[in-house]
Image (spheres, helix red, strand yellow):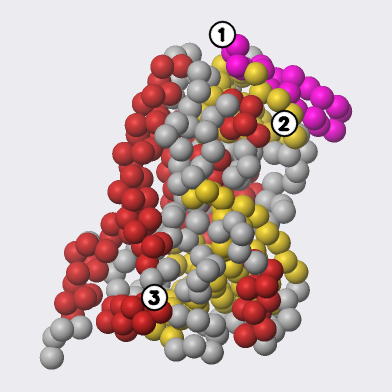
Amino acid sequence: MYDFVVVGVGPAGARFARRAAERGHDVLALEQGTIGTPLACSGHVSTDIWSVTGECAREELLQNEIHGARFHVGGPRSDAYPFYKREVASNVIDRVGLDRHLADLAREAGADVREHHSVTSVTERRDRVEVVASGPDGPTTFQAKMVAGCDGPRSRVRQELGLPEPDELLHGVLAFSEESDHEDFVDVHLTPPTFFAWRIPRGEAGVEYGLAAPPGVEVTKHFEELIDGYEIDVAHRCSGAIPIGPADRVTSRRGFLIGDAAAQTKPFTGGGILYGTTAADHAAREIDPERPTTLAAYEHAWREDLKRDQQLGHWLRRAYSLPEPIQRVGLSALSGEIGVHMDRPTSLVSPTHLKAMLSRLRP
């Protein structure tokens, strides 16, 4: 009987497995394939990423440092509106390497991390949870006091527990070209009816191109237009779902969701590493596997922490679909030095950002 069975060993699952194991809990973490693959998430992250990694991670995972972003209302040849910081604003990392690194930290903390175990059913009993997984030796039933669903946007655990779906699932596409690029700016394209598109220089690792769009949009067509606009050939492509908008409930009697499974993501970019690992920390602190009633404390804690940023993030996303003339006026007026944290929209009213804005008014 495990204290927790964690389904999915991405950043959120690995973080929870590590933190729960450090608290003395008996943790089993199951990944359906090889940890880190297939890649379905951008490697552009805030510098806060190093707060959840171990020593020397930066040396192993960092690919490029970013100081700002150029926003475009249109394709690659459209006018650019730069936003920047004097210090490093964000990092580009080896995204596959990050997953593997975080999984290793969970193992070092004492969690039993197993790859190639695909969960096929989750059944809640009065005093336990039964998790059936198909592994290298065939189907195996694991018993636990609780189950953590960290298995992504189309979570099997969420489905098995009968928990509600996220508000929406966007379609994201990534592709990579092989030329080295050490430029310290990313390019962001606000191109309705898509969500947005981007170009991220990854140093010696090449360049990442991506696009996210709501259901019904011709994703392939718009992505081809992006690639053609940059006049490049891409080495390989991958795609995945991006959950936006958490449901009213992410816990059941003996189960709970973390990360993309719970739609703990940024509404204005779809990124979820910081939000998911933050929620994982709340889960490890608040949930006692012996006391299912503590699940309510987890629900309250993560929502209270992320609520304002997610709410403001939804307002920012709406600006992506404003008429083009309004977008241009807004970007032109606001471009320049900023003090905004890329994961925290509430930093728009931070002293750092206000100071940067006021500095533009000085003669």
- Height in image: 297 above or below 55? above
Q: Which residue bears the numbered disc 3?
A: 323
Whether the residues at callouts 3 and 2 have beta carbons within 8 Å, the answer is: no
**Disc ID at residue 126:** 1
- Mark 1: amino acid: Arg
Residue depicted at x 43% and y 86%: 80
Residue 46 placed where, x, y %?
A: 44, 61
Horizontal side of residue 72 vs 150, given as left or right? left
> Is residue 349 located in the magenta-colored stretch of the structure?
no
In primary-sequence order, the first of circles 3 and 1 is 1
In primary-sequence order, the first of circles 1 and 2 is 2
Q: Name the secondary structure under disc 2.
A: strand
- Mark 3: amino acid: Pro
Between 280 and 216, the one lying in front of the other is: 216
Q: Which residue bears the numbered disc 2?
A: 119
The C terminus lies in which quarter of the figure? bottom left
Horizontal side of residue 127 vs 68, given as left or right? right
- Mark 2: amino acid: Val
Between 331 and 183, the one lying in front of the other is: 331
Horizontal side of residue 197 vs 230, given as left or right? left
Residue 324 placed where, x, y %?
A: 40, 79
- Height in image: 331 above or below 261? below
Residue 246 placed where, x, y %?
A: 45, 42
Between 271 and 274, the one lying in front of the other is: 271
Q: Name the secondary structure under disc 3.
A: loop
In primary-sequence order, the first of circles 3 and 2 is 2
